[in-house]
Image (spheres, rainbow, N blue to C red):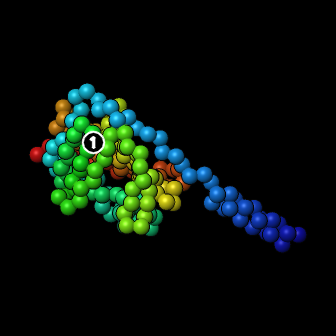
Amino acid sequence: MSMRIASGSIFVLLSAALIAGCAQREELLPKSAAVPAGVDLSGNWKLVDESGDDIRRARRRDDLIHVFLESGARLKITQTREGLFISFDRAIVEEYRFGEKRVINVGPVEADRVSGWEGQAYVIETLGPENNKLVETYSLGEAGRMLQRRVDLYRGGALSRSRTQRFEKT
């Protein structure tokens, strides 16, 4: 009898794993391309909250979404009419188009990306091949003298890690 229960339990677990593996991939919803009046993220920014710098260490994870995560102690942001260019420590430059929805890649790894405005914040969502998601949010504070960057990592639809960085304008 206990052998039959154990076999039944294994069958249920395998069935659940199979169903989860066949789950439909999340669809990223487009963001607004309209720049909010008076919002300009442009500038040279220096990290002031060192506790938020552990985002760099978050890149050393096993899932593939981390290859799309950039970080730096100094950011240079250039905002144009169509998008943002963000330079991380003068080494890596990322380009984002307001209202974009496209496939991006780092080497052979592809991901879906949307970016644009949500209220006064610029939001970038990247959905990796394992259905894990990276959400970056940039917003201004203190009359434009501070830049806040929040990085949220989702695994299986649940928030697994969240960090906030604060930068001051230099």
Q: Residue at left 30%, top 61%?
A: 56
Spot occupied by residue 65 in the image (x, y as percentages of width and height): 42, 59
The amino acid marked with disc number 1 is Gly
Task: Identify the residue shown where x is 41% and y is 49%.
Answer: 102
Q: Please state if 154 lies on the left or on the right of 169 as rendered.
A: right
In front here: 97 or 127?
97
**Residue 55 at least partly seen:** yes
Residue 27 placement (x, y as % from top left): 52, 46
- Residue 74, by quadrant, is bottom left
42 over 23 or under it: above or below: above
Query: Seen in the image, is 114 located left or right of residue 43?
Result: right
Give the residue displayed 44% in from the left and 67% down from the top: 62
Question: Does residue 160 show up?
Answer: no
Crowd around label 1: few <14 · some 14–19 · many ≥20 (10 Å):
some
- Give the image quarter of residue 119: top left
Left or right: where does residue 8 sit relative to residue 58?
A: right
> Which residue is drawn at the image coordinates 18% and 31% (left, top)?
143
Secondary element under disc 1, as helix, strand or loop, is strand
Q: Position of residue 123 (x, y in %)?
A: 36, 42
Pick the quarter of the image with the N terminus. bottom right
